[in-house]
Image (cartoon, helix red, strand yellow):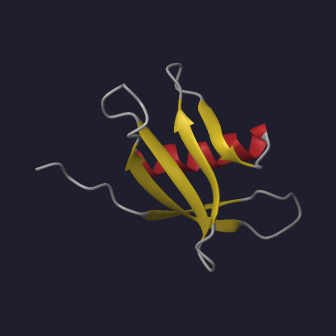
C-alpha cells in the first residue's frame, strides 16, 4: 500500500518588514505527470485554507510555480523551507 504524504507547516518571511507567514503544505503525487513519484506541493494559509499556489521541483531541483502569484524570491524561500522539512 502506498504511504500518504503528511501535511505540514512552514514559516517563511515573504514580505520584508512584516511578520513571517505560516503556510500549510500539502504534498501530493502529481497525477498529471507521466513521471512516477513526481510531487506537487499545494500551499495555503493556515487560517483560511484557500490554495495560494502549487509548487513542484523541476528536473534540475529548482522550484517552479504551477499556479499562484508568488514571485521567484518567495518561491525560493518557500521551497527552501519545504526542503528543510525533509532534511
| In this view, 68 is above or below 12 | above
The residue lying furthest to the bottom in this view is 47
The residue lying furthest to the top in this view is 60
The residue lying furthest to the right in this view is 17
User: Residue at position x 87%, y 57% from top?
Assistant: 16
**x and y percentages locating residue 63 in the rendered image:** 60, 34
User: Residue at position x 76%, y 38% from top?
Assistant: 72
Q: Is residue 67 left or right of residue 1?
A: right
The residue lying furthest to the left in this view is 1
In this view of the protein, which residue sits in the foreground, 59 or 73?
59
Count of marks, rendered view = 0
User: Residue at position x 47%, y 43% from top?
Assistant: 40
| In this view, 62 is above or below 43 | above
**x and y percentages locating residue 76 in the rendered image:** 67, 40
Q: Quadrant of the C terminus?
A: top left
- The quadrant holding residue 21 is bottom right
User: Residue at position x 63%, y 78% from top?
Assistant: 48
In this view of the protein, which residue sits in the foreground, 68 or 6?
68
- The quadrant holding residue 46 is bottom right
**x and y percentages locating residue 78 in the rendered image:** 63, 49
Q: Is residue 10 left or right of residue 52?
A: left
**x and y percentages locating residue 13 in the rendered image:** 74, 59
Amino acid at each position: 500500500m502506498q504511504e500518504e504524504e503528511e501535511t505540514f507547516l512552514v514559516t517563511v518571511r515573504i514580505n520584508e518588514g512584516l511578520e513571517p507567514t505560516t503556510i500549510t503544505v500539502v504534498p501530493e503525487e502529481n497525477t498529471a505527470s507521466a513521471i512516477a513519484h513526481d510531487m506537487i506541493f499545494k500551499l495555503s494559509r493556515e487560517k483560511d485554507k484557500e490554495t495560494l499556489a502549487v509548487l513542484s521541483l523541476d528536473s534540475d531541483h529548482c522550484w517552479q510555480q504551477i499556479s499562484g502569484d508568488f514571485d521567484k524570491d518567495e518561491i525560493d524561500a518557500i521551497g527552501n523551507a519545504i526542503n528543510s522539512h525533509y532534511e
